[in-house]
Image (cartoon, rainbow, N blue to C red):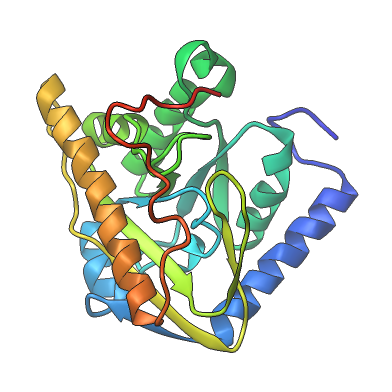
Amino acid sequence: MKGVGGDGGLAEEAMGFALAQYLKLVKRLNRFVVEPSDLDTCLGALHPVITAMWHGQHLMIPFARASQMTHACAMVSRHRDAGLQAVALRRLNVEPVRGSGARGDKVREKGGAKALITLRRKLDGGATIAMTADVPKVARVCGMGIVTLARISGRPIAPVAVVTSRRLDFKSWDRASIGLPFGRGAIVVGAPVRVAADASEAEMEAARLAVQDGLDAAHARAYALVGSSDPGAGLRPAPGAGLRRE
């Protein structure tokens, strides 16, 4: 295995290619509906945009792309276990940017700040950005990373859910799901969240909660459209319970 910033070995490349091909198959062999209207209207009008997603519900997000979005990037963890996803993203014509959010003394180690600077440059160049809103091990609690990117870039955040009726649900910390073929699918885009360049601390917190609520609503609606329920609903810690640190 090469370093965290580089490509993996031949096995990782092969598995990443296989994952990308499988996800394309899932997309092709499910009957998808889009709300509201179509992706060119609801996402294309916001281009370049930051598409927000929840951990565990992110594998199909590359297919939530308007025709205007010819260049897309996604933040991917530096951890070597995420190398497979980075390869798959490249195979799906999405450029991986390595780094992830964190809490406490792991912020520098995870490379989140450096990745945010890179993502801002990508947005300035017209790229669409996909980013998980919750930081690792703190499921369904939106962090400040995605809100900070919106503030420094001036670009809106669109909460997005891409789900399928037939899927495998895992008992991971984020209740990750991977779709299966021959079912129904839904792509739901929530109301955009904008953050002013001079946003106060209170306004940043309001934007964070708006993204969090928007993602909850988008996933609830998407799963309802396919006649199912969100496997990750209810994962958020109760108010005052404290957040688990990595």
- In the image, is residue 241 above or below residue 19? above
- Residue at image position (74%, 57%) is 16
Q: Quadrant of residue 133?
A: top left
- In the image, is residue 25 above or below residue 79? below
x and y, in percent, of residue 95 in the image: 56, 48
x and y, in percent, of residue 47 in the image: 27, 56
| 206 relative to 63 in the view: left or right | left
- In the image, is residue 91 above or below residue 206? below
Rendered-image quadrant of the N terminus? top right
Q: Nearer the viewer, residue 35 or 128?
A: 35
- Residue at image position (72%, 49%) is 84
x and y, in percent, of residue 216 in the image: 30, 55
Q: Nearer the viewer, residue 40 or 52?
A: 52
Q: Nearer the viewer, residue 207 or 71?
A: 207
Q: Nearer the viewer, residue 104 or 227?
A: 227
Rendered-image quadrant of the C terminus? top right
| 145 relative to 200 in the view: left or right | right
- What residue occupies the far top of the structure in this picture? 105
Residue 154 in sight? no
Q: Quadrant of residue 220?
A: bottom left
x and y, in percent, of residue 126 in the image: 34, 49
Q: Count the marks.
A: 0
- Residue at image position (86%, 44%) is 9
| 121 relative to 95 in the view: left or right | left
Residue 72 in sight? yes
- In the image, is residue 224 above or below residue 197? below
- What residue occupies the far right of the structure in this picture? 10
